[in-house]
Image: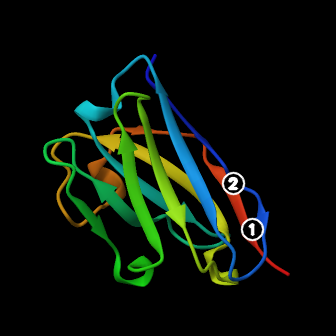
């Protein structure tokens, strides 16, 4: 069974940094476009960033540009989200997702496989 597992979420102070990891079992991440999403309480799940399986190209939503960086390590079958200059409004459950030929809009419906999420809390 295809499974994605996120890790790295924790409590961090405003201005701090975290690196989230996305691991996969039963399939090879490099064959898929991988996206990072988040969902805060009472809000819809929103796309943050995506990395292409074809050329490693990346896209970011404007509100995370310059603070978040997505990357992949194909040898380890891992995808990462480096998050810097974290703000309280970044508090959410963060999810990684895998899909094929994902369009730049990064909609939830464009992804086929999801992890269970990892909690990130930004607070002093």
Residue 19: image quadrant is: bottom right
Q: How many marks?
A: 2
Q: Nearer the viewer, residue 86 or 61?
A: 86
**Residue 112 coordinates in the image, percent (x, y):** 33, 38
Asked if the residue under mark 2 is in contact with the one under mark 1, i.e. CB atoms within 8 Å, the reply is yes
Figure colour scheme: rainbow
Residue hosting label 1? 121
- Residue 24 — which label? none
On screen, residue 92 above or below 16: above
**Residue 84 coordinates in the image, percent (x, y):** 57, 73
Q: Residue at x 61, y 47 (%)?
A: 117
Q: Nearer the viewer, residue 39 or 5?
A: 5
| Distance CA(mark 1)–CA(mark 2) | 8 Å
Q: Residue at x 68, y 82 (%)?
A: 15
Q: Residue at x 49, y 57 (%)?
A: 81
Badge 1 marks a residue whose secondary structure is strand
Query: In the picture provided, is 115 more to the left or to the right than 102?
Result: right
Residue hosting label 2? 9
Q: Name the image quarter holding the C terminus.
A: bottom right
Query: In the picture provided, is 33 more to the left or to the right than 98?
Result: left
For mark 1, does the 10 Å Cα neighbourhood hold few (<14), some (14 to 19), or many (20 or more) residues? many
On screen, residue 46 above or below 54: below
**Residue 120 coordinates in the image, percent (x, y):** 69, 62
**Residue 40 coordinates in the image, percent (x, y):** 63, 69
Residue 107: image quadrant is: bottom left
Point out the tag, 1 or 2, that comes first from the N-terminus.
Answer: 2
On screen, residue 117 above or below 73: below
């Amino acid at each position: 069974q295809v499974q994605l597992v996120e890790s790295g979420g924790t409590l961090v102070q405003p201005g701090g940094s975290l690196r989230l990891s996305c691991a996969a079992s039963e399939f090879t991440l490099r064959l898929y476009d991988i996206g990072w999403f988040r969902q805060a309480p009472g809000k819809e799940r929103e796309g943050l960033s995506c990395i292409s399986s074809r050329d490693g190209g990346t896209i970011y939503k404007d509100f995370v540009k310059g603070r978040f960086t997505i990357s992949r390590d194909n040898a380890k079958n891992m995808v990462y989200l480096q998050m810097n200059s974290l703000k309280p409004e970044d508090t959410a459950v963060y999810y990684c997702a895998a899909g094929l030929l994902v369009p730049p809009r990064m909609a939830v419906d464009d992804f086929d496989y999801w992890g269970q999420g990892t909690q990130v809390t930004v607070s002093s």
